[in-house]
Amino acid sequence: MEVARNAAGQPILDANGYYTGRILGLAEDPLVNFRVGTPFNSDQQATIDGFEFAIQHSFWNTGFGAILNYTIVNGDARFDNALNPNLGQFALAGLSDSANAVLYYDKGGLQARVAYNWRDEFYAGGNPNPTYVEKYGQVDASVSYEFIRGLTAFAEGINLTGASRRGHRRSENFVTFSQPGYARYMGGLRLSF
């Protein structure tokens, strides 16, 4: 073993073959090239701005309520599909509008919730071959009941409508991924003590 020959008599491996000491280089050893890289911030500049609108309201003492929000996000560095693909572009990834609407009930140990979550299409990255994630919405629901203090039964369903997700490149016809949507259900008991 080359390493053991260059160890200058030092025990570098224990009885199990594990490294235990230092390995000393020799003058006749060849030079080793190292490449050291560090992340850096681009000198490109961009502006992100937007608005968020939200309202939450309980309908008096009925236990019913609603939560609504809408977020608008804009940036001034967008990917331009019409440019030559051999030219690099600076673009902001992940920006899109989104919305959520929730109806809930919470009274007397019973909690129920139905939510619709939506996100508009967005540029996900990729240069020179951009990837776009298409607009997507799903419905989730949950219900729980606390029988006695600390013992709660619950059930929830995620993506109840089975909404699927897709992504494409420069053209909507060039699909890069398509994830079929499946509803997922969970249920159980929670014990807190």
Image (cartoon, rainbow, N blue to C red):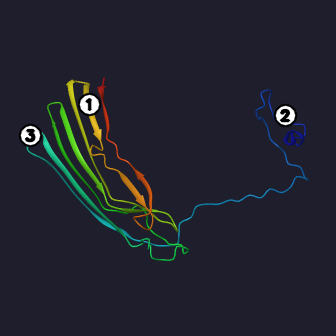
The reply to whether callout 3 and callout 1 are in contact (CB within 8 Å) is no
Residue 2 shown left or right of residue 60 in the figure: right
Residue 130 shown left or right of residue 141 in the figure: right
Mark 2 closeness class: few <14, some 14–19, many ≥20 residues within 10 Å: few
On the image, numbered disc 3 is attached to which residue? 62
**Residue 12 percent location from the top left of the image:** 82, 36
Q: Nearer the viewer, mark 2 or mark 1?
A: 1
Q: Quadrant where the C terminus lies?
A: top left
* Nearest to N terminus: mark 3 or mark 2: 2
**Residue 187 percent location from the top left of the image:** 30, 30
Q: Residue at 86%, 36% (x, y): give it.
A: 10
- The amino acid type, in three-letter code, at marker 1 is Phe
* Distance between the alpha carbons at the discs numbered 3 and 2: 77 Å
Q: Nearer the viewer, mark 3 or mark 1?
A: 1
Q: Quadrant where the N terminus lies?
A: top right
On the image, numbered disc 2 is attached to which residue? 11
Secondary element type, mark 1: strand
* Nearest to N terminus: mark 2 or mark 1: 2
Q: Residue at 71%, 59% (x, y): give it.
A: 35
Disc ID at residue 190: none
Farthest residue in the bottom direction?
83
Q: How many labels does the image show?
A: 3
- The amino acid type, in three-letter code, at marker 3 is Thr
* Distance between the alpha carbons at the discs numbered 2 and 1: 61 Å
Mark 1 closeness class: few <14, some 14–19, many ≥20 residues within 10 Å: some
On the image, numbered disc 1 is attached to which residue? 154
58 lies above or below 185: below
Q: Which of marks 3 and 2 is in front?
A: 3
* Distance between the alpha carbons at the discs numbered 3 and 1: 21 Å
- The amino acid type, in three-letter code, at marker 2 is Pro
Secondary element type, mark 2: loop
Q: Residue at 22%, 24% (x, y): give it.
A: 149
